[in-house]
Amino acid sequence: MTSLKFGTSGLRGLVTELVGLPTYAHVRAFCAVLREDGVSGEILIGQDLRSSSPLIASQCAQAVADVGLVPVACGAVPTPALALAAMTAGSPAIMVTGSHIPDDRNGLKFYRAEGEIDKADEQRILAQHQALGLETAPEVTVSPTSRDVLSGYVARYSGFFGQALSGMTIGVYEHSSVGRDVIGTVLSALGATPVSLGRSDRFIPVDTEALRPEDEQLAAQWAGERRLDAIVSTDGDADRPLVADESGRFLRGDLVGALTARLLGADAIVTPVTSNSALDRPSAFAQVVRTRVGSPYVIAGMAQAKAQGARIVIGFEANGGVLLGSDVTRNGKTLPALPTRDAMLPILSTLALARSQGTTLGALAGEASFAVALSNRLQEIPQERTAALIARLDAEDPTFRDSAFADHGGVAARDDRDGLRLTLGSGATVHFRPSGNAPELRVYVEAADQVQAEALMAQYLGFAAAQTRPA
């Protein structure tokens, strides 16, 4: 049984099950879908910095060339920079990335000229993959032309934000993010002084929803050693941001998304059920659309909000990735829509909001009055075990569910749109959700304060571990 599957954003799996024929065949299937729809010409190809990405990118190029389309190599670039270039050129694109998952895994993200593919496109690709029935992949012989896509990405933000960050000193946690250099370039263009931190020659799987303790320790250490206004970073393919305040405390991704929406004047936000419950307060935003986790669902929700008359639509996820669903004009400058996850926009928007108000990121976070929310994960948990636990909690065994949450007033409400989100009698929430990209069980909690949230997380992470342990 293969590990390859379409998850929350793209096709992902073990490198050993992706390199070679699987990559070639899936890209051929994508090209077949494009051909059915009358698409011709170029397909842009980008990659992240993980060790397997250059080989996979070359196999993508061979598959594109073999169907009579033109592969264009864009090199190691952020996913949103590739998407922007593809949309500007009116060309499809393929990004080779596993995002935040470990180096032994990788993936493919597919883009039409209009933007990221949707769930219907995924099903068409899988159907074409089966219909093609390819059994071998040729050796790579094609030498695609190359193209710079970073200059347009830099110009997009330097033109819109101007000198909005003048005088700020920003630490850039570079690790192995494919966006590590362009972040510094953009910060400098906006008047800030970037400080390079933690650059790595090996791939580090930084997950913005489940930070490693060492990442949090490093941020606190750097903040203590240097006078920084903030520390910023991204995941591996630079479509999800990390933003830490002046003391090195990381802001949750949904808070970063909300601050971005605030700066840009959004009248509608679209966000998954995993994002903070504070967003649903009547005074927060005029319209809030909740979705399942995954950028295709957020994109569909943005289309829904626009159809209902929203003027400025911002989509974001609890992992921090922000999707710009509308053109935004501010101070006489217009930022065109970019309906794919992007780390640069929320990083710059959050910093610019603090700068414009003459305050700190820590103060902005405090004023938002979000519930204290934590997320963590259990790795190497087969999805059938996760599904069995959720089914038992959801409907199959109410006695089991009631006893599991008796210490917190039982279960007052449930939401099964994506995994199972339980609102407890105490007002706290616990959410169990299978990852769409890896054999992992995600656990999310919300509580009134940090101590309660940490206790809740420890209790129900342990509970989930015990319940999914092999018999």
Image (spheres, rainbow, N blue to C red):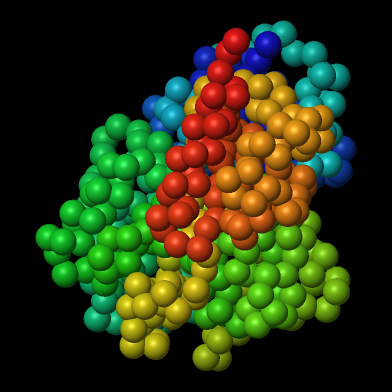
- Residue at 66%, 56% (x, y): give it: 425
Q: Position of residue 103 (x, y in %)?
A: 42, 27
Q: Quadrant of residue 302?
A: bottom right
Q: Is residue 305 above or below residue 332?
A: above
- Residue at 32%, 67% (x, y): give it: 245
State the count of labels.
0
Q: Quadrant of residue 401?
A: top right
Query: 318 or 296: which is nearer to us?
Result: 318
Question: Furthest-left residue in view?
Answer: 225
Residue 239 vs residue 218: left or right? right
Query: 140 or 306: which is nearer to us?
Result: 306
Q: Is residue 147 above or below residue 470?
A: below
Q: Quadrant of residue 32?
A: top right
Q: Is residue 146 visible?
A: no
In which quadrant is the C terminus drawn?
top right
Q: Position of residue 62 (x, y in %)?
A: 60, 26
- Residue at 45%, 40% (x, y): give it: 458
- Residue at 52%, 15% (x, y): give it: 16
Q: Position of residue 424 (x, y in %)?
A: 65, 53
Q: Is residue 360 visible?
A: yes
Q: Position of residue 159 (x, y in %)?
A: 46, 78
In which quadrant is the N terminus drawn?
top right
